[in-house]
Image (spheres, rainbow, N blue to C red):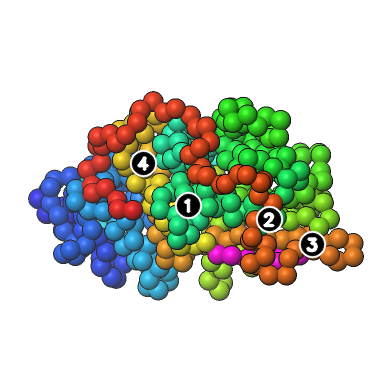
Amino acid sequence: MAELARRLVEALDGLLGIPVPLRVQAWDGSVAGPPGAPTVVLRNRRALRRLLWHPGELGLARAYVSGDLEVAPGTDLYDVLRAVARFAERPEIRRLRLGPGDVLGARGRRVVGALLRAGALGPEPVPPPEEAPTGRGRLHSRGRDRAAIHHHYDVGNDFYGLVLGPSMVYSCAYWEPAAKSLEAAQEAKLDLICRKLGLRPGMRLLDVGSGWGSLVLHAARHYGVRAVGVSISEEQVALARRRVEEAGLADRVEIRLQDYREIPDGPFDAISSVGMAEHVGEAQYRVYAEGLYRLLAPGGRLLNHQIARRPDHPGEPYRPSPFINRYVFPDGELSPVGSTVSRLEEAGFEVRDVESLREHYGLTLREWVANLEARWTEAVGLVGRGRARVWRLYMAASALAFEENRIGVNQILAVRSTAEGAAHLPATRAEWLAAPGTVPGTVPGTASDLPVPEGPGAGPAQTDLGDRGSVR
């Protein structure tokens, strides 16, 4: 058994035809793989069984979430994820299709022999309990959407406060030059949205998927609007309502536990949808776009802030990430930005501006990962070690995906023109970013001036992460 790692790595290299990009430390203490490569630790035979039953992303995720696979001490999680992602994108791996002949041939027999000697062949391990159940009714029905949102968002407001920081904003920040902290960058994003929407005192704003209420609070406080925020997360709504009361804005801000398909009381002068449309799904996107169009007054503006995927490779169907779908955003779907623009135009909107914030999201996610790692023990106490590992893996992998242009995020500004074709939009971007609607005598502050929940602890805590903490 002293050479277990070498046997496994050699067998896998032979089956794939190219070297794996990681060093592997087996549970017997042996290590093998390319010198200088990031190292992962197989803590037990079950780690191999997870990978054998589900080769690729899902097996790796299950092994990491369960703790059967670890990142070695001194190794950065980002380095491991970067190596795996680049390996998966290599043409040889994308074209690889292992059939019975490969598995039963000499190369396959070498792998099976190595697994037999390691005692790794056996029944499929039970998935970690953090995995969402599948097949919960008709895709994107209201009941199934509520279950999906509950899985992701109702894990505890204290946990989200720990990760997101005082802003309680769960979407890409806007890292303008003056933004020296996550809170300042989130404040800048909220204000950017308000300026793009041309908010002015007395206007009526709808925020679809309003989260913990930060945008409607900012818009009411600094732009004098009357705002309605809707979410189908019970925990988000409970905290948002509390924040509204504590801010003294209950006369101007209403928070509803409501599906976007159930909003009866348009028209609104402006609509924002920030990080919500990813949950809608391709089959329902026309319903979403047409519904917002009906709710918007003629001459009103829509700001749609949405993550986008790259277009599919020719001949390849869209396959959502199995890890993201099972552990993070059940039933979430990403579309290329061009498809989103087309769906909005088909619903009647005139798209006037598209701004990519891809690099901004990479920076934001690294801040969230650093927040989680700095208070790891506290996070584990709030949601359990498995779920904390889900979040660390998902946010770190997403940061790299944005940085390396595998996914993007865009703010799309669209208008519902009047019957005469008027858009009521200034002629240049500089004009509609000038914030003419800011309430006199108020100055946008920082998101931390809004009420946030008091967490069970404060300050950095000891972690049980064996690997090296990530760097912002």
Distance from Cα at disc 1 to Cα at disc 2: 21 Å
The answer to which of marks 4 and 2 sits earlier in the sequence is 4
Q: Kindly indicate whether the residue at mark 1 contacts the one at mark 3 (C-beta within 8 angstroms).
A: no
Magenta span: 348-356
Amino acid at pointer 4:
Leu
Amino acid at dot 3: His
In x, y percent, where is residue 13? Answer: 25, 65
Numbered badge on residue 424: 3
| Mark 2 crowd level (few <14, some 14–19, many ≥20, 10 Å Cα) | some
Q: Amino acid at mark 2?
A: Pro
With 296 as the anchor, is 215 left or right in this view? left
Residue 372, labelled with which disc? 4
**Label 1 vs label 2, nearer the camera:** 2
Q: Is residue 1 above or below residue 415?
A: above
Residue hosting label 2: 436
Q: Residue 23 has which mark?
A: none
Circle 3 packing at 10 Å, graded few (<14), some (14-19), many (20+), is some
**Mark 2: which secondary structure?**
loop
The residue at which mark 1 appears reads as: 185
| Position of residue 38 measured from the top left corner of the image (x, y, whole percent) | 23, 58
Answer with the quarter of the image where residue 92 lies. Answer: bottom left
Q: Tags 3 and 4 in contact by the CB under 8 Å rule?
A: no
In percent of width and height, residue 35 lies at: 16, 64
